[in-house]
Amino acid sequence: MKTKQIAIVGASGYSGEELVRLLLSHPHAELSAVTSRQYAGQTLAQVFPKFAHHARARGLHFSEPNAELLAKRAEIVFLALPHGVAAEFATPLLRLGCQVIDLSADFRVKSAAVYKEFYAHDHPAPELLSQAVYGLPEVYRAEIKRASLIACPGCYPTSILLPTLPLLRAGLVKPTGIIADSLSGVSGAGRKAELDYLFVECNESVRPYGLPKHRHLSEIEQELSLAAGTPVILQFTPHLIPVNRGILTTLYLAPAQDWVAARAMDELGGKMAACYQAAYGVEPFVRLLEGKALPDTKNVVGTNVIEIAWRLDPRTGRLVVMSAEDNLVKGAGGQAVQCLNLMCGFPETAGLV
Amino acid sequence: MKTKQIAIVGASGYSGEELVRLLLSHPHAELSAVTSRQYAGQTLAQVFPKFAHHARARGLHFSEPNAELLAKRAEIVFLALPHGVAAEFATPLLRLGCQVIDLSADFRVKSAAVYKEFYAHDHPAPELLSQAVYGLPEVYRAEIKRASLIACPGCYPTSILLPTLPLLRAGLVKPTGIIADSLSGVSGAGRKAELDYLFVECNESVRPYGLPKHRHLSEIEQELSLAAGTPVILQFTPHLIPVNRGILTTLYLAPAQDWVAARAMDELGGKMAACYQAAYGVEPFVRLLEGKALPDTKNVVGTNVIEIAWRLDPRTGRLVVMSAEDNLVKGAGGQAVQCLNLMCGFPETAGLV
Amino acid sequence: MKTKQIAIVGASGYSGEELVRLLLSHPHAELSAVTSRQYAGQTLAQVFPKFAHHARARGLHFSEPNAELLAKRAEIVFLALPHGVAAEFATPLLRLGCQVIDLSADFRVKSAAVYKEFYAHDHPAPELLSQAVYGLPEVYRAEIKRASLIACPGCYPTSILLPTLPLLRAGLVKPTGIIADSLSGVSGAGRKAELDYLFVECNESVRPYGLPKHRHLSEIEQELSLAAGTPVILQFTPHLIPVNRGILTTLYLAPAQDWVAARAMDELGGKMAACYQAAYGVEPFVRLLEGKALPDTKNVVGTNVIEIAWRLDPRTGRLVVMSAEDNLVKGAGGQAVQCLNLMCGFPETAGLV
Amino acid sequence: MKTKQIAIVGASGYSGEELVRLLLSHPHAELSAVTSRQYAGQTLAQVFPKFAHHARARGLHFSEPNAELLAKRAEIVFLALPHGVAAEFATPLLRLGCQVIDLSADFRVKSAAVYKEFYAHDHPAPELLSQAVYGLPEVYRAEIKRASLIACPGCYPTSILLPTLPLLRAGLVKPTGIIADSLSGVSGAGRKAELDYLFVECNESVRPYGLPKHRHLSEIEQELSLAAGTPVILQFTPHLIPVNRGILTTLYLAPAQDWVAARAMDELGGKMAACYQAAYGVEPFVRLLEGKALPDTKNVVGTNVIEIAWRLDPRTGRLVVMSAEDNLVKGAGGQAVQCLNLMCGFPETAGLV
């Protein structure tokens, strides 16, 4: 299989670092350029000693990001940049013939107006929105294979969408009143020197933040609405918890039909199981938990797997669905590599197991 | 003020240890006996070196629990025992003239049938249920003052009831469809040598457990129903998070009246604020957060304070209420001491600030 | 007992915050001013919600630091500032008649030349060095009582000096070849927005730093030399470990006399115990561990206690001494309050138990 | 390259679990049996959900350990058992023709008398001691290649021996007065349901333990003595710190020649660098840090790499050497797989990068 030349723009943030980790071990990718304004001129191994023992890390230096140079050295470019900045690089890179896998929020929502509402500035490249494909392989596998611009989903959206979309599509749950309560490790905040994310401020602390209108709602509601065939408004509460990695999401949903009777419960339980099995039974990175097992972030950290479990509550008539993922892998770099594999015709799990 | 002689039965668990900490510094209490089957014969300072510098800790040895002896040495006895066992001690202690403050679940629910449903065995002392007072001072202050048997609320119930009861009582929220999503530190599981609570199994891990029918629902729903004047069924999902102490609860509620319009929102916001102010404005241990502040367990750990904040979501029409408490203080030992203070006519904050 | 008016300059760092915590509960101190350039104008409760329930916190606002104003509002001023800056405030405050308790390094070393060697700039107020008293109550109690300028020891120095000084003074250990290996919680690095102290960079990480010539060596060696009566050079390796608070120091010392024989060991063990007992037997904040007990930071966190244990190793002929303290209490704010108590004639343990 | 059939006895402890992780991804190994008395009958994926997505994990069930059956299913057997128990399996497995890689302490010391001194019971299979090879590839590579019984070093020994052996062999440091101060993550204590290792007892805690005569001293001193050509007695202090994985060791050594002069320092520094370079310059799993870099466990966790850095202290004349490793990889399972690779003629890094 032909090796692809890959560049990462913004390789010193947590998502960028995770991409580096994954691509250094990828059997069909060659990391030919990594950029970082902060560390330009230093070797990859100086900034991240943990990569020093990778033979392929040895020649790599961080450089200033420059679209022309990147286009000469890479066929596919990952953007691990803040929103707004990512689009500035996507435009010239696409023009120069690169394929772009963007991990920022810039191309996730299809409407420039929605983008402005949630990100508080005009979209920097609205003309590209129509060609961007939302990089959720379990949903858009076919589109990703032929895309030149991938908008990788955010970490929260992945943890919410994968458990919810099949149920909405199958009409098993109501599109109204959905609640997502999410717990995220601190790497989700990025590698930023801010007081709020100091060890002492996060350790022995648990706190909600960013409610009720978190930016990720824009893409989540877009995808939920597409699956439901009707506009979906989500209640979403993110919390910060003292772990490095991992997102645990608990979803509260209402079954579409009234069912609180032992027999109806069995029937609905069977439909739910069948729905999930149909959606994800052969997916390499979705683990449907059985029996008494419940998701635990420690079972997925470092992997591209999302765990999903659900419970019907006969007392409330409600459905509780839980998911666990690594916010930096299935929620960022791993999913991006999964997209890369699809775009290049590599095995979908290459470099991810 | 006359000093009271106090005993703690089961003083080597996490709740018991916290009671020791609080009572050693209490201005009007004298800890005259501590029991522990496991550590009987050892001094308090040998088992818990951190107490060695308290002058009052010096004479204290752990003894085997014995109701006759305890009744000779103490006027008030705290029970920090597993459910089922607590009732066995409460019965003789009450007969011998002691007042009993029970931190277990044994006397929290008023119905022996509900107890059996949730705890899977017959109630060990159903004849005492009618005299037990639920030890939530913000709700049952008058009753606590004249009680001889206090059933201290569980840690989750306190974090859920205090934010919810005033709204239900005032009819501001619907009694249906309430959801409580709670995150608890590991001390909530008790000092038990079980694999699930080893450092390596809890650190870098976040996980739900015990859903959808957690035992604490029995007392929570009892109190919610009393406040609402109608049976309330709660959706409750507890999660285990890697902190020693602290519970963060996020509640999802539906305002009683439709209000999604800017003006109605202001009005409802005003009613909410007034409702909480009326309920807790002068409470010494309830902190209503203002402005942009949100609860954070690190602001309450080690204190008897519960923080409460709320947000009306104009997009969903829902009300999100959040609380933070220390599960071992306001959720256990601190609340128990608050009850002690009320029972004895001490200042309610004695030993708690 | 007459209440003293107290001010804290630099009250928003970790040491300053700890001073606030201790002084709000101090029976004879009234906190009349807190300064912070960063938070000037905000109330104490806005910046630190955890203090909001202290009645005495209510009127307090952070102000810009101004010596004239501080001298009007306080008789005693704590400086919790970076080195270099502290001296700038100490000079006018002393002139205006205040007593100053400085938690920085500015007045710890008696020689301006040594200061310059270790801190890389000229001493900002060398004329004050002779009047400053090193604020280690167990050693300089008499001097502290009549001092107007206290130089509180650093957190590492306290953890090293208290276990070592009595042995050197008694001539039980050689003054040569001493090694101190210390482990510090992250609050020791201060509340600084730097990448190195982000949660993700510290959690699941253990690392040495600042060796072999850490700044604290200047004061440690000064005090060790005074006790030994001869210059002492120390080997010191600090490490950063993922806890909020606490320092654990392990010291390696050589007994002054060769003793590796069972009988000599008993004799030396007896001398060691007698030496520590004589030095600290009645000290309120030094806990000499007996039997098999070893120091553990969790036994001292939140208290002003330092735990000390020692072991003679018959295989190596060496003495291993271990200490545990809370770097923000006995290593900073608590020790400073202990000095305050001595200066004002309050009970030495006031506000500290 | 021919695939080898591999079994793991005791696969549900932390070392065993790590072996499973490594062998499931090993290109030339096929895990054909895993045993666990506790979990016999359950699938690997039920006990460790995180392995469920490995295609090769699917058929695997935990079985009761039985030497006859194991010998039928595997050519090479890893023993991840407590000391004493491991020897009971090694004897029949070797007789049945298997090669054995033992992760316990049973075959690490060459003298049954030393074993008894440190482990407090007679050696269970002294006749095998002479054929066992100490599984430290950087030292015994040739012997490992032709061994049938490997005694994998302990986690502390690896972190101490690799930095020290080259210096002793080269005569650059004195064989006397060596001190090793080590900090270990909690997984080093094993997956044991004991109160001491509960999350709440370890989190926010740092503590020394097991000094001054830890069991690992037996093997460490054996290997140090062999390298020095003279008996070496080590001062060793282990500490428990709240991380899942990782050992950080700080070593204090005396250069063989007096050197405290700037010029001699340069010369000695050069010799040190040359010595380490000669020993480890081409080793795939030893990272010699340059410049200002110091070891950090977070740089090695999950890898088979050990980081080493050193500092000459011109003030004390001493040499400080620091190392960082993952106690479960280079300190246990990873090193065992490295031995496997050598024994089977696989590339030494197979399955380890």
Image: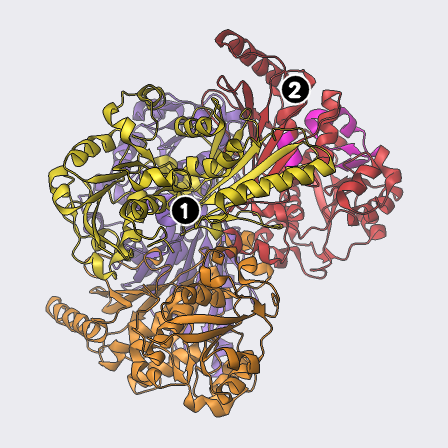
Chain colours: A yellow, B red, C purple, D orange
Can the viewer see residue C6? no
- Toward the bottom, the furthest residue is D127
Which residue is more in the foreground, C172 or C304? C304
Q: Is residue B149 magenta?
A: yes
> Which residue position is annotated with label 1?
A244
Instruction: Find residue B183 and report its horizontal and vertical position in percent.
Output: 56, 39
Q: Which chain contains the residue that carries disc 2? A: B
Q: Quadrant of residue C101?
A: top left
Which residue is more in the foreground, B126 or D30? D30
Q: CA distance from mark 2 to mark 1?
A: 38 Å
Amino acid type at circle 2 is Lys
Instruction: Identify the disc placed on residue D122.
Output: none
Can the viewer see residue C168? yes
Which residue is more in the foreground, D113 or A145? A145
- Toward the top, the furthest residue is B263
In the visual, does B97 lie left or right of A27?
A: right
Q: Work out whether C236 lies above or below A277.
A: below
In the visual, does C244 lie left or right of B39?
A: left
Q: Is residue C66 magenta?
A: no
Quarter of the figure with the C terminus of chain D? bottom left
Instruction: Find residue C84 and report its horizontal and vertical position in percent.
Output: 24, 39
Q: Which residues are magenta?
A: B131-160
Does dot 1 land on a helix, a strand or a loop? loop
Q: Residues within 10 Å of mark 2 (few under 14, many from 20)?
A: some
Q: Residue at x 65, y 54 (%)?
A: B58
Q: Nearer the viewer, mark 2 or mark 1?
A: 2
Q: Work out whether C289 lies above or below B183.
A: below
Instruction: Identify the disc placed on residue B174.
Output: 2
Instruction: Find residue B252 and report its horizontal and vertical position in percent.
Output: 58, 26
